[in-house]
Image (spheres, coloured by chain):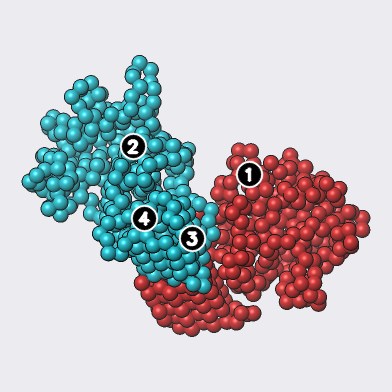
Chain colours: A red, B cyan
Amino acid sequence: MCNALGIVNFPGSNVKVKGMSDYRPIAAFSFLGRYRMVDFPISNMTNSEIEEIQIYLKNRPRSVFSHVGTGRHYNINSKRGGISILYGENSPESEFYNTDIASFKANIRTIEKSNKDYVIIAPSHMLYSLNYDTVLKAHVESGADVSVVYKAVDNAKTHYHDCNTLLLNKQKGVLSIEKNRGNYKSRNISMDTYVLSKKLFVELIDEALKTSSLFWFTDILNEKCEELDIRGYQYRGYLAAITDLASFYEANMDLLNREVAEDLFKEEWPIYTRTNDSSPTKYTTDAKVRKCIISNGCCIEGEIENSVIGRGCIIKKGAVVKNSVICPNTIVGEGVYLNHVVVDKEVTISKVKNVQGMFEAPAYVRKGDRI
Amino acid sequence: MKNQMLAMILAGGRGTRLEALTKKVAKPAVYFGGKYRIIDFPLSNCANSGIDVVGVLTQYESILLNSYVAGGSHWGLDAKDSGVFVLPPREKDQTEFNVYRGTADAITQNIDFIDSYDPEYVLILSGDHIYKMNYAKMLAHHKENNADCTIAVLPVPIKEASRFGIMNTDETGRIVEFEEKPEHPKSNLASMGIYIFNWKLLRKMLNEDDKNPNSHHDFGKDIIPTLLNDGKRLFSWKFEGYWKDVGTISSLWEANMDLLYRAKELDLQDPNWKIYTQDKSAVPQYIGETGDIVNSFVDQGCMIDGKVDGSVIFTSVKIGKDAVVKDSVVLPEAQIGEGAKLNRVIVADGVKIAPNAVVGDPNSEEIQLIAKNVR
């Protein structure tokens, strides 16, 4: 049992996935064909034996509600613990005011009611697998006020745009938190994952509100770098930050590489998701598949290479899908050619025979479109 | 809400002819169709037909079935007024502790369980048949006929009819005669072992049967003939669709192959009649650089680096580079080494086939069961 309340937070305005985020919060994004993004932080929490989990949402909660439900599929003891989905009850006058701090404040009673001594905050737009209980133990042992999980990367010029980065001293003390503008190769990317006592968390929420109505949790931490003992906790495994369509696409492509996938999907660390009761996938005599990830419930009659295919997709005869991410329940018609494309859910592509993007800028087909 | 019809699934069958597959589990728990167990079919049919309470009568090697079906959550049968209950033989006050002596006795020994729900009708099912059926339609038919008992029947080719229990009916579908494996069948309507009874009548019959020392305590041999003798209203309900009793290794193989070659009859992808099963946390299937899959059914969690052709591959199977799996059924978590060649086999769950091993024979009539690791 882990003595912490788990909080799955929503990302700030630095995260904007063109197209896809018009339909659902990032927590509900389909990922790797069968998961939704929120499965990763929740599974990390339940695997770490966190019993109480709160999921914060800004808007469009429907898809998260139906996916998370009672949370039983995440292995949560429904009597002792539980999962709750929360969002700011008062719709703000302007999107600017819709901060995580405002949302925490609106639900402060449910936070205070928890009998856990610590909180662990994790974002819904980052993919990694990490034992939070280990982080909590290290945090308690270090005597720090706040621990921030980060990964040291050397591709920050081209990746992790607008992510928070940590400026650390030699003792891993956080000197400041700033945005990655792509000016340096090597940076400590903050995983927006925090461990602190519940008491300090509640104090910081109030202090943030007193300082500025536009403050996010990261902002108040940055303000407090000198006053509080804020320290970095280094993570070394696979990390993907989904901040735009290109990074969403790239993370899916990354995981086609089996060694990378084994870094995220560990046998003793399962990633849970809601079952859809799909049958196994059927391949006809015309199927031609090479280097791809295919979910259940599909019918594959065409050719697929280096792609991720979601649940319940139909790839018709003569269709060619290359370097693409196809979200669930999409139909790719006869003779259609796709290369470097992200196709959202429930799309039918039949009349248009050729859709192509580029690796750095994949093409996007909207949810429910018929083209 | 009162439960109008309760279902009782007979799941005690040992299935000896399935060899090593039923060494540790009962026949209803045998794997089928890439991710299912056979008992998922009657249980999903119940859930989809609006039946809320299901008793599962177990006897032979029941531990796995107990943990598998108990609670009923895999099939959505876990709401307040519903449930799946595992019913092995038990010791009772003032009666001798006894195994289930026959299909009818299994119900007799659970009369108290059925009474506690006070149902109007009881549906008796077999836990080891593969088919999709709407029992609600069968019940409607039963009520329309004002029947005492309705038996689902399947038209079979007349030359095979002598292998089945055959129902001879009049033009209204009323059963006038029942013949077990007749030498000269008069009709081709085979009993599917699916019965709807009015509970009050069945309860009385079972109590009488219990006291009869000459009875086999079997539905087909004792209860149905007695009802006919008594002039009760027995009606047939004709089922047209896919139905299979997988009694042997080769019929189990054949049923899996039917998913590839008779997909229209047994459609597992129909969103309106899903077959539910235990959900396993597995990643989607990975097909590697050298992987190749044609004409096959493959489940999640698999890692395919070899060639798969005309086969059904279950959850989390690994198939190495240059391996060829043809016309075979590979059960969960089996591992096929690099360069191994498989033809016309069923590989049991968890079995490891070493690199370059050759298993099975493409020219053989027989289907081989591979239940032990192959070096």
In the picture as drawn, the residue positioned furthest to the front comes out as B375
Quick one: label 4 or label 3, which is nearer the N terminus? Answer: 3
Provide the secondary structure element on which disc 1 rests. strand
Q: Can you tell which of label 1 and label 2 is closer to the viewer?
A: 2
Callout 4, which amino acid? Ile
- Report whether mark 3 lies on the same chain as mark 2: yes
Foreground of the two, B35 or B23: B23
Quarter of the image containing the N terminus of chain A?
top right
CA gap, disc 1 to disc 2?
38 Å
CA gap, disc 1 to disc 4?
43 Å
Tell me the number on the disc at residue B318. Answer: 3
Quick one: label 2 or label 4, which is nearer the N terminus? Answer: 2
According to the picture, the residue beneath numbered tag 1 turns out to be A82
Q: Can you tell which of label 3 and label 1 is closer to the viewer?
A: 3
The disc numbered 2 marks a residue on which chain? B
The disc numbered 1 marks a residue on which chain? A
Callout 2, which amino acid? Gly
Q: Can you tell which of label 3 and label 2 is closer to the viewer?
A: 3
Which residue is rendered at x = 74% and y = 49% of the image? A134
Q: Position of residue B203 (x, y in %)?
A: 27, 27
Q: From what the image shows, is residue A317 above or below residue A55? A: below
Which residue is rendered at x = 40% and y = 79% of the image? A318
Tell me the number on the disc at residue B346. Answer: 4
Q: Is residue A141 left or right of residue B72?
A: right
Q: Is residue B40 left or right of residue A192?
A: left
According to the picture, the residue beneath numbered tag 2 turns out to be B12
- Is there a contact, CB below 8 Å, between mark 2 and mark 4? no
Q: Position of residue A281 (x, y in %)?
A: 43, 63
